[in-house]
Image (spheres, helix red, strand yellow):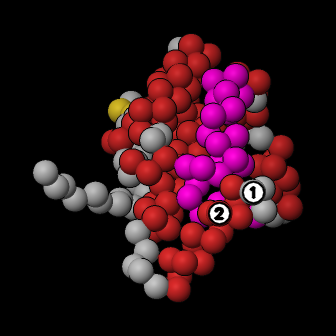
Amino acid sequence: MEWTLNSHRSLPSWHQNKVVLVGDASHPMLPYLAQGAAQAIEDAGVLQVVLNKSSTDIGLAIKIYEQVRKARGEAVQASASEVRTALHLPDDLEQRERDNKIRLAGQGKGDNPDLWADKDMQQWLWSTDIMKETLLKWPEWRARAKGTHLSSLNAVAYSW
């Protein structure tokens, strides 16, 4: 059996009014990092946190959900695409160089082009507690979404 694996560009937004996208609807994953379900669970967890914290302002909650999740979801999506490219090189010099980098990374020397096996990538993927981070940074996320974050105020002050 064969099927085509397609990459998709990032969406400009993950919400419209009170409709929000989660999981593969917002960041379709290639299978190379095995992160499709994990990222969907992170989406659901953050959505639960923001809806709990802002139950009377659903629009604000959805805006914050997108602020919290979009960059990470898209970074994981892009990383999976990078692995696809790295693992499907034609038999030539570039492939041999990649194989050597993988070998050296296994000895603790350099980055691994197979991000699935890269220790820094594993740390970033598996040790992030996005729900906890959302709760801890809630005041900052809320201020940004409302346009009252300090950096937003500075931008206004400097424009006078």
The alpha-carbon separation of the residues under discs 1 and 2 comes to 7 Å
The amino acid pointed to by label 2 is Arg
Question: Residue 107 has which mark?
Answer: 1
Quadrant in the picture for residue 19:
top left
Front residue of 115/145: it is 115
Residue 29 placed where, x, y %?
40, 48
Residue at the spot 53% in from the left edge and 22% down from the top edge:
45
Front residue of 17/24: it is 24
Residue lying at the far left of the rendered structure: 1
User: Crowding near pointer 1: few (<14 within 10 Å), some, many (20+)?
Assistant: few
The amino acid pointed to by label 1 is Gln
Check if mark 1's residue and mark 2's residue have beta carbons within 8 Å.
yes
Q: Which residues are magenta?
A: 110-133
Residue 42 placed where, x, y %?
53, 29
Residue at the spot 75% in from the left edge and 64% down from the top edge:
110
From the viewer's perspective, tell me whether residue 89 is left or right of residue 53: left
Residue at the spot 60% in from the left edge and 50% down from the top edge:
117
Residue 53 placed where, x, y %?
62, 16
The residue that mark 2 highlights is 103
User: Crowding near pointer 2: few (<14 within 10 Å), some, many (20+)?
Assistant: some
From the viewer's perspective, tell me whether residue 145 is left or right of residue 27: right
- Secondary structure at badge 1 equals loop
From the viewer's perspective, tell me whether residue 4 is left or right of residue 24: left
- Residue 59 to residue 95: above or below: above
User: In the rendered picture of this protein, how many numbered marks are placed on residues?
Assistant: 2
Quadrant in the picture for residue 5:
bottom left
- Residue 73 to residue 45: above or below: below
Question: In this rendering, does residue 14 appear at all?
Answer: no
Quarter holding the C terminus?
Answer: bottom right
- Residue 151 to residue 101: above or below: above
Residue 7 placed where, x, y %?
35, 60
